[in-house]
Image: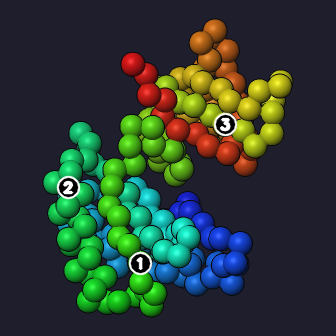
Amino acid sequence: MLTHSYLFIGEDDKGDIMAGKNIVTEVDSLIRPVVDGAGCELYDLVFAKEGANWYLRVFIDKPGGVTIDDCERVSRAVEKELDAKDPIEQSYILEVSSPGLDRPLKKDADFERFKDSMVEVRLYKPRGGRKEFTGRLAGLLDGNVVIIDGSGNELRFPKPDVALCRLAVVF
């Protein structure tokens, strides 16, 4: 079960919060074996309402990266499973994709997996007049996202203060 999934709702959809969380949990349990069977990892799952449409976004990953063929194969398999079990009452659009080069780090395992990678950290509130920091990821230690900045300074950010931590795309 995903523990850090997002559920986005519009102003008029506050009553759908619980239903959306239940859908994410149910869909996760249905499609995780399908995604695993396709040789991929279920990286994240999002059930979101945008305008008049609902979207079920499935983010997959695998060592060496995800190809368009992986996305197509997983999409067809997931669609078949969801059609058979029909866990979502309303109409929705299924999207299967990679989390991308600048993927957000959400699970504790992500912080271990991408240790020593360059990351961008965004805070909810400024620290020293700044909300954005870049550095080499040292890990998730004692509930803190720890990075080493360009000057070699260790910076620690309590995880609840971090709005976003994602891989930095370096060219």
Secondary structure at numbered mark 3: strand
Residue type, numbered disc 3: Arg
> What residue sits right under mark 2 in the picture?
70
Work out how far the residue at label 3 is from the one at label 1, CA to CA, in angstroms.
31 Å
Residue 47 percent coordinates (x, y): 49, 71
Work out whether residue 117 can be spotted.
no
Nearest-to-viewer mark from 3 and 1: 1
Mark 1, residue position: 92
Report the residue that reaches farthest toward the top: 151
Q: Residue at x 17, y 63 (%)?
A: 73
| Residue located beneath label 3 in the image | 122
Q: Position of residue 68 (x, y in %)?
A: 21, 51
Mark nearer the N terminus (1 vs 2): 2
What percent of the width, then of the height, locates residue 19? 58, 84
**Secondary structure of residue under mark 2:** helix
Kind of residue sitting beneath label 2: Asp
> Foreground residue, 8 or 78?
8
* 3 or 1: tag closer to the N-terminus: 1
Residue at x-position 63% and y-position 82%: 16
Kindly identify which numbered label has been placed on residue 112: none
